[in-house]
Image (spheres, rainbow, N blue to C red):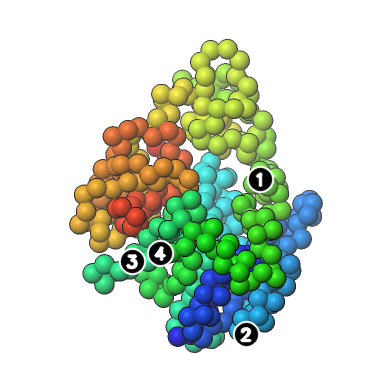
């Protein structure tokens, strides 16, 4: 079986490649180049974090060790359009984006498969994601990885059927510790356990998105009014880029009740706040829905309304262009622009982008 494995130079994709090679796959390593910030005002904007020269050198060594060819795909243009420009646009609209979901949907899986199929005539693609696949009645579902602390199924819920069916997740059935042990035993020269894992978005060099957004959406750096639910000015913010939905710290509103960020109104440059009980929500709508057959056949569901959120029981109402979630227990500050992913047990059965409310 001819398989293209996406390689980042990190431990997970490297172990995935090792496992596939051991299983007898006709393996081809693929290094994807993505766009990086090239603003003249950006200090340290030299390379994309996940596809830099150091990563490429590691990948070249790995491919030599595994005796597999390496191909380089340049997706800078597509990444800029489908991920980066959209990221900036969402913040400009007062939304909180999740670009990793877009990248997986548009670039790392779909575009990778299409180009590898066309240029290399592969059968499958593979990645180092912590997720699994389960087939039920000829439909292929994304399933949580074995390691619940590393599970990445949330970020993969939008993958189309034709791509999921052609995707392998070699480390999905392993825990992170098991991956580390395997790397130490079989790939010791790479010293993966001594390397720090990247946790931030790849296309800017800083540890926060705020400097990046400040460079490309300057209006979000301007001070403006903080208003309550009655549109009364109760303070001044230091630029909307510095706030997220549900935030309490840093508002600097003296006296009175404790306030939280309720919404961000970029056209008027207002930061709208409210009390804790008034940012709780028991109903949210999801747009751009992904719906699978299991959502029609099962009755018990849990929804994860952001990465790291504990999945919460919910009731579901389906319509043509949206999903409505009703929670028996109110949820704190569901964030427009983020995504809610719906599970039945460990299987992804639906999801969508949280709409403004």
Q: Earlier in the sequence, mark 3 or mark 1?
A: 3
Q: Is residue 24 visible?
A: yes
Contact check, label 1 and label 2, Cβ < 8 Å: no
Inter-mark Cα distance, 3 to 2: 31 Å
Residue appearing at x 38%, y 44% in the figure: 311
Residue appearing at x 48%, y 80% in the figure: 23
Residue appearing at x 32%, y 33% in the figure: 329
Query: Residue 94 has which mark?
Result: none
Q: Which residue corresponds to mark 2?
A: 67
Inter-mark Cα distance, 4 to 3: 7 Å
Q: Earlier in the sequence, mark 1 or mark 4?
A: 4
Q: Residues within 10 Å of mark 1 (few under 14, many from 20)?
A: few
Q: Residue furthest top?
A: 255
The answer to whether 339 is drawn above or below residue 247 in the figure is below
In this view, the mark in front (1 or 2)? 2
Q: Which residue corresponds to mark 3?
A: 134
């Amino acid at each position: 079986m001819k398989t293209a494995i996406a390689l980042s130079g990190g431990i997970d994709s490297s172990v995935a490649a090792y496992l596939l090679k051991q299983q007898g796959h006709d393996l081809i390593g693929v290094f994807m180049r993505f766009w990086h910030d090239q603003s003249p005002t950006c200090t340290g904007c030299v390379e994309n974090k996940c596809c830099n020269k150091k990563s490429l050198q590691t990948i070249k060594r790995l491919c030599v060790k595994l005796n597999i060819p390496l191909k380089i795909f340049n997706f800078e243009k597509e990444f800029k359009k489908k991920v980066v420009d959209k990221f900036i646009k969402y913040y400009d609209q007062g939304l909180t984006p999740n670009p990793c979901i877009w990248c997986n949907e548009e670039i790392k899986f779909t575009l990778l498969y299409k180009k590898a199929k066309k240029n290399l005539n592969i059968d499958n693609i593979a990645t180092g994601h912590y997720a699994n696949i389960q087939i039920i009645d000829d439909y292929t579902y994304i399933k949580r990885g074995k390691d619940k602390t590393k599970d990445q199924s949330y970020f993969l819920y939008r993958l189309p059927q034709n791509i999921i069916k052609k995707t392998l997740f070699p480390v999905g059935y392993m825990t992170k510790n098991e991956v580390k042990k395997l790397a130490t035993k079989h790939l010791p020269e790479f010293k993966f356990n001594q390397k720090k894992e990247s946790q931030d978005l790849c296309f800017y060099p800083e540890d926060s998105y705020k400097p990046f957004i400040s460079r490309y959406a300057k209006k979000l750096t301007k001070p403006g009014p903080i208003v309550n639910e009655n549109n009364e000015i109760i303070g001044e913010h230091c630029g909307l880029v510095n706030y997220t939905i549900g935030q309490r710290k840093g508002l600097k509103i003296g006296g009175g009740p404790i306030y939280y960020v309720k919404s961000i109104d970029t056209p008027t440059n207002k930061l709208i706040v409210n009390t804790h009980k008034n940012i709780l929500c028991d109903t949210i709508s999801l747009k751009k829905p992904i719906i699978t057959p299991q959502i029609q056949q099962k009755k018990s569901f849990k929804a994860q309304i952001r990465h790291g959120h504990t999945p919460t029981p919910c009731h579901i109402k389906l319509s043509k262009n949206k999903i409505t979630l009703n929670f028996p227990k109110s949820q704190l500050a569901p964030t427009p622009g983020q995504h809610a992913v719906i599970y039945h047990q460990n299987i992804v059965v639906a999801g969508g982008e949280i709409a403004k409310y």
